[in-house]
Image (cartoon, helix red, strand yellow):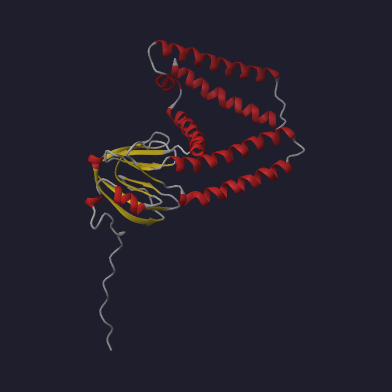
Amino acid sequence: MTKILRGVAYVAFPGELVLLVCLLSGVRLPGAVLAGVEALVVAVVLAELAVFVSLRRRGLTTREAVAALVPEKPRRLVGHEVRVLASIGRWAVRRPHGVGAGDLAFGHAKAQAALLGTFAFVCVVETAVLHILLAGVPLVQAVFLVLDVYTVVLIVGLHAAAVTRPHVVGADGSLRVRSGAHVDLLLPAARIASVRYELRLNPGAEEDGVLELAAASQTSVTVELQEPVEHVSLLGARRPVTTVRFHADDARALVAAAPRTRGASGPGVTRARTEPSPSPGPPASA
């Protein structure tokens, strides 16, 4: 039943969006088409609610019931957006996420703050310009105003997520690596082989077993693992990783506080590795 509902929803909701675009564009549609699509959407929503109630009565939790009805990718995208918006509230009350007693938090928001600020400024200017240009079309003007304002709010939320979801060196020796609201990877202390400072600019293509979490096109901390951990991407793709590279605003302090810094050479911090110098050629003859 849930598969049938998903199939119908894949047709009904995009159809509703197409009708909305047509109406905003001034396209006249037959009344029968409008009534049919609206009736289909209402029927799908009511059927979904009925199945949800049925699943809850069978003993499933709310999360399990929603997972049975909604495909994983849309569910993950909506969840990410909710976390981003909730981060604005956390930022306002200065309440970081996932930092307990005895934990040490290390931010990663400063590197990309200027870029996100520029995006927000551009969107604000665009909002003002479009609002003036679309003054003769009030309905379209209102739609674009809502979309543009929401875009600005999302950009603020992305920065707030980076601020309120720092990297965490746990009191139990674990290392929690984050990238805003879309990556949250826990590295247990038993699996960490070494943690070192290693500045890498403009990370290249993705390597097997390597997770790159660059901020402003740079990473500054490299973690080598004794055993792989599973990384789940924003859309649900899973893969094992044995090396994690990420950026921290105070990378050297994070490395010094990390549980397996002793696995690296030196007093808790190693220099970034460089390519060996080429061998000099034979001396030129006189």
Single out the residue that lies furthest toward the bottom. 286
Task: Name the residue: 46% across, 43% down.
Answer: 163
Residue 54: percent from left, percent from top: 44, 11
**Quadrant of the rendering where the N terminus is positioned:** top left
> Can residue 226 be seen at all in this image of the molecule?
no
Residue 149, picture quadrant: top right
Single out the residue that lies furthest toward the right. 136
Residue 273 vertical placement versus 97 (above, below) = below
Q: Nearer the viewer, residue 1 or 199?
A: 199
2 with respect to 21 (left or right): left
Task: Name the residue: 64% across, 26% down.
Answer: 19
**Quadrant of the rendering where the C terminus is positioned:** bottom left
Residue 168 vertical placement versus 33 (above, below) = below
88 with respect to 173 (left or right): right
Residue 87: percent from left, percent from top: 49, 36
Residue 8 vertical placement versus 239 (above, below) = above
209 with respect to 53 (left or right): left
Q: Nearer the viewer, residue 186 or 202?
A: 186
